[in-house]
Image (cartoon, rainbow, N blue to C red):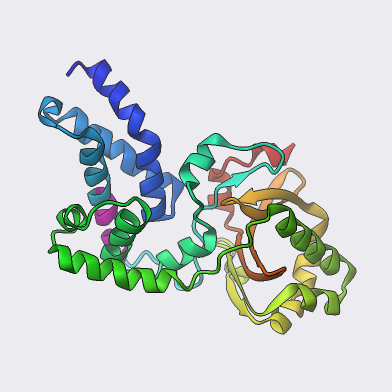
Amino acid sequence: MHVDLLADAFESHRTHLRAVSYRMLGSLSEADDAVQDAWLRLSRSDADDIENLGGWLTTVVSRICLNMLRSRVSRREQPLGPHVPDPLVSRVDSGNPEHEALLGDSVGLAMLVVLDTLSPAERIAFVLHDVFAVPFPDVAAVLAVTPPTARQLASRARRRVGTAPVPDADPARQREVVDAFFAASRNGDFEALLSLLDPEVVLRSDGGDSRPSITRIIRGGHALGEQAILFAQGAPFAQPALVNGAAGVVVVRDGRPLSVMGFVVRDGVIVAIDVLADPERLRRLDLVPWLG
């Protein structure tokens, strides 16, 4: 196949491959690296012998992601504190087709946090089969296991992923609750804060290596309400955003992004908050619309 035709054929699958990689890795930059690696392998192969290019590329990128996940484990790259995956941040008033394509039916930060707790094989099996409907024999080929083993891996992952909170379907209601949360924080209204927080709410804050003091997990409505001063400081600088398709904010001060916050609002209360405050990773996100 001529190289230009091959490149065009690959580009027609790029969005799908990036969506697969993002779910497997939880990192936008690593997902792009995996997709680029898949292109290099395709360009060096005898493409004329590939009968199903989409299936071939999905298998290749899945194996690349599997190796990357295993490398994380072997090099002990997983942080000791909470890790918030790369968020997909979009304007509330205008859709982002690229992000919508990556999200598909939606993959919230809370789900990605749970996916991070899975073994590499469990994560690959779940993403391929449960998210992208890849048959178990094909999943087994990626993992070099038997189909029953692949089925068992996906089943274990499914039980864990089932614990991830799912937000209410109404985005306007989500936004109302998040806005009320910041208003209560700004006003120091502890009772109003408690009314907006699920008693079992969990906040995960990831400040990275440069901001370890704000890397923490806070559990429970009362414990989180007592930290209202943290949110009060950022409330005047919080700009509305969609974070992985759900209500969130980008906190910007003096033209510098301080954090991206994703909320899970369910039954009218906040059940989870995920905060990315790592300056290095924030710089890699496309936050230009919020910096003006």
The answer to if 256 sits in the magenta stretch is no
Q: Taking 127 as reference, is 268 left or right? A: right
The stretch drawn in magenta includes residue 66:
yes
Which residue is nearer to you in this view: 153 or 85?
153
The location of residue 210, given as percent across then percent down, is 56, 61
Can you give x and y, in whole percent of width and height, for residue 101 in the image? 48, 40
253 up-or-down from 150: above or below: above
Report the side of 114 relative to 253 (left or right): left
Q: Is residue 133 above or below residue 275?
A: above
Q: Is residue 186 visible?
A: yes
Q: Residue at x 36, y 48 (%)?
A: 21
Q: On the image, which quarter does residue 267 sit in? A: bottom right
Q: Is residue 234 visible?
A: no
Q: Which residues are magenta?
A: 64-73
> Residue 67: where, in percent of width, then height?
24, 55
Image quadrant in which you'd find residue 13? top left
193 displayed left or right of 7: right
In the rendered image, the quadrant that contains the C terminus is top right
Above or below residue 16? Residue 10 is above
Residue visible at 76% across and 78% down in the picture = 225
Q: Position of residue 59 (x, y in %)?
A: 22, 46
Residue 179: quarter of image? bottom right
Magenta stretch: dominant secondary structure: helix
Which quarter of the image is occupied by the N terminus?
top left
Above or below: residue 228 compared with residue 39: below
Picture residue at 27% right of the left edge, 59% below the top: 71
Query: Across the whole image, how many numbered discs are drawn on residues?
Result: 0
- Which residue is at a point 41% across and 65% down the rendered structure image? 116
Front residue (pair 127, 36): 127
